[in-house]
Image (cartoon, rainbow, N blue to C red):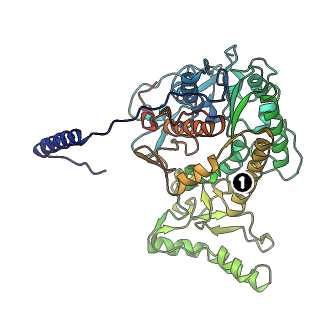
């Protein structure tokens, strides 16, 4: 990175110039600044606010849950602004430290948080070991129940049906340490607090996330649904989602509570899926030639398949593997949606295109050797990437179709209950294309530098959660007659960090 050094004399000139500019501005200022109106909650009853959701609600960031992240969760930020307009206390099931890790007895069940090591994300413990610094112990024990109920019922990893699954705390340690009883449900613990106001956010995100982050591995094809046996990577059936979402909102509003819902973004717009290019392989002419020779038999077999009428010439061209002397060769991948040519002894291989999404962890796998020391076993070149490393267009469509169906269900429930919806789908789309403007910042979804998404490529930074809080207040203003924005009570997103120092422990 280039360093910019300013000569001292020019620095003093700049200071003097700024001084003159400030004086001139003061002299010319004749108009009085109108005072902002006092804050009012309008028709919103914010006296007992309860949030329910998954990792975003909990304040999960940088691949972990820890105190500083929880304090900057969007519900906690909201509660601080609500307190200025009649809101009551807001409690969270805080972790014991800022390591991000968690143990069950002596067994690790959650990893240390990610930090930026100057080049990219790295786990805190690994970073500290690399620089010879002491590694702090993990002090949060998942087996220790906190013995209370909390306004923030945000549980990392929770899918829609988990909110109504009795005993979910035995499956998810984050809920286990905060559940009111062994058989409690997330929804029950939220509703039993008789909220006057609630936020229900990101329900549906995890219902497609595990499928997407696994490269589309493990989707359920049976059409059957059983929360006890449903695979971790399966996409939740939209019909089931709609039924569960209706149940959740019915119970939250049973005693007349007001609230705000949020729709589900296209998670494929997140940097976990957009950071690694499809063509990151540099090859010289000699290496490219050697690899092409290795694939010559496969390419020839494709032509035999065309001659035999098994595939079209277009599919053969799509599947043909060819490298060149270039810095931008596409990786080779397995694609289960290609025509099955196993009868000819041909696997389902092709090179990736710009339409494929490589998951973030593939960046540290591509270019490694399957057999250490053997350059003929380079992963992504001689050895195709397995399905878990790539989200193909067909797999992406499964995610998008499910998301659209979830959002249709959310909007239908919102309309029937008279509840407003925050359009996080549109906000993330804007951030991933043009960026979103907040104060002096343009926030994008670029990993590390974009400011919106944390180092894990999925969850938000504290600044991103501040944006979420403002978006909720904007909708509350529009729907309940409050004036958080007009009274100057939106939070300043610039006051929230985009990353946390390794020294924070």
Residue under pointer 1: 399
Residue 176: x and y in percent read 72, 23
Query: In this orientation, which residue lies closer to the viewer: 370 or 172?
Result: 172
Element under disc 1? helix
Query: In this orientation, which residue lies closer to the viewer: 101 or 93?
Result: 93
- In the image, is 341 to the left or to the right of 90? right
Q: Residues within 10 Å of mark 1 (few under 14, many from 20)?
A: many
Residue at 65 percent across and 49 percent down: it is 265
Residue 18: x and y in percent read 19, 42
Q: Is residue 321 above or below residue 100?
A: below
Most extreme residue toward the left, as rendered? 9
**Residue 197 visible in rendering:** yes
Residue 19: x and y in percent read 17, 39
Residue at 73 percent across and 38 percent down: it is 419
The answer to which quarter of the image holds residue 259 is top right
**Residue 369 visible in rendering:** no
Residue 432: x and y in percent read 54, 54
- In the image, is 186 to the left or to the right of 139? right
Query: In this orientation, which residue lies closer to the viewer: 437 or 100?
Result: 437
The answer to which quarter of the image holds residue 331 is bottom right
Query: In this orientation, which residue lies closer to the viewer: 411 or 107?
Result: 411
Most extreme residue toward the top, as rendered? 147
The answer to which quarter of the image holds residue 471 is top right
């Amino acid at each position: 990175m280039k360093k910019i050094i300013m000569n001292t004399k020019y620095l003093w000139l700049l200071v003097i110039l700024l001084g003159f500019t400030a004086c001139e501005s003061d002299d010319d200022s004749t108009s009085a600044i109108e005072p902002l109106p006092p804050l009012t909650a309008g028709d919103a009853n914010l006296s007992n606010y309860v949030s329910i959701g998954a990792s975003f609600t909990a304040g999960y960031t940088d691949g972990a849950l820890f105190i500083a992240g929880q304090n900057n969760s969007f519900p906690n930020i909201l509660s601080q602004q609500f307190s200025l307009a009649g809101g009551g206390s807001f409690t969270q099931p805080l972790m014991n430290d800022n390591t991000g890790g968690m143990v069950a007895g002596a067994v690790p069940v959650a990893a240390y948080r990610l930090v930026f090591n100057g080049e990219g994300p790295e786990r805190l413990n690994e970073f500290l070991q690399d620089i010879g610094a002491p590694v702090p112990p993990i002090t949060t024990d998942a087996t220790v129940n906190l013995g209370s109920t909390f306004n923030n019922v945000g549980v990392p990893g929770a899918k829609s049906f988990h909110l109504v699954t009795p005993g979910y705390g035995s499956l998810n340690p984050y809920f286990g340490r905060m559940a009111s009883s062994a058989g409690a449900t997330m929804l029950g613990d939220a509703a039993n607090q008789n909220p006057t106001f609630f936020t229900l956010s990101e329900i549906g995100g995890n219902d497609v996330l595990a499928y997407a982050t696994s490269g589309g591995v493990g989707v359920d094809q049976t059409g059957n649904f059983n929360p006890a046996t449903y695979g971790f990577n399966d996409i939740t059936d939209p019909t089931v989602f709609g039924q569960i979402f209706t149940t959740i909102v019915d119970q939250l509003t049973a005693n007349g509570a007001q609230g705000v819902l949020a729709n589900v973004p296209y998670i494929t717009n997140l940097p976990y899926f957009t950071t690694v290019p499809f063509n990151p392989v540099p090859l010289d002419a000699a290496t490219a030639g050697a690899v092409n020779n290795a694939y010559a038999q496969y390419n020839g077999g494709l032509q035999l398949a065309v001659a035999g009428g098994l595939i079209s010439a277009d599919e053969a061209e799509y599947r043909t593997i060819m490298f060149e002397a270039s810095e931008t060769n596409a990786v080779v991948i397995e694609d289960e949606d290609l025509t099955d040519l196993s009868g000819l002894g041909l696997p389902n291989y092709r090179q990736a295109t710009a339409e494929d999404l490589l998951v973030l962890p593939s960046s540290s796998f591509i270019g490694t050797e399957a057999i250490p020391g053997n350059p003929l076993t380079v992963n992504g070149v001689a050895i195709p990437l397995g399905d878990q490393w790539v989200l193909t267009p067909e797999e992406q469509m499964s995610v998008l179709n499910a998301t659209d169906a979830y959002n249709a269900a959310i909007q239908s429930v919102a309309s029937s209950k008279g509840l407003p919806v925050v359009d996080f789908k549109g906000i993330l789309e804007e951030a991933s294309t043009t960026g979103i403007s907040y104060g002096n910042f343009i926030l994008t979804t670029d990993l590390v530098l974009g400011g919106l998404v944390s180092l894990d490529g999925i969850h938000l930074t504290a600044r991103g959660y501040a944006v979420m809080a403002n978006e909720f207040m904007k909708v509350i203003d529009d729907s309940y007659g409050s004036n958080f924005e007009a009274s100057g009570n939106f939070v300043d997103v610039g006051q929230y960090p985009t990353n946390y120092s390794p020294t924070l422990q």
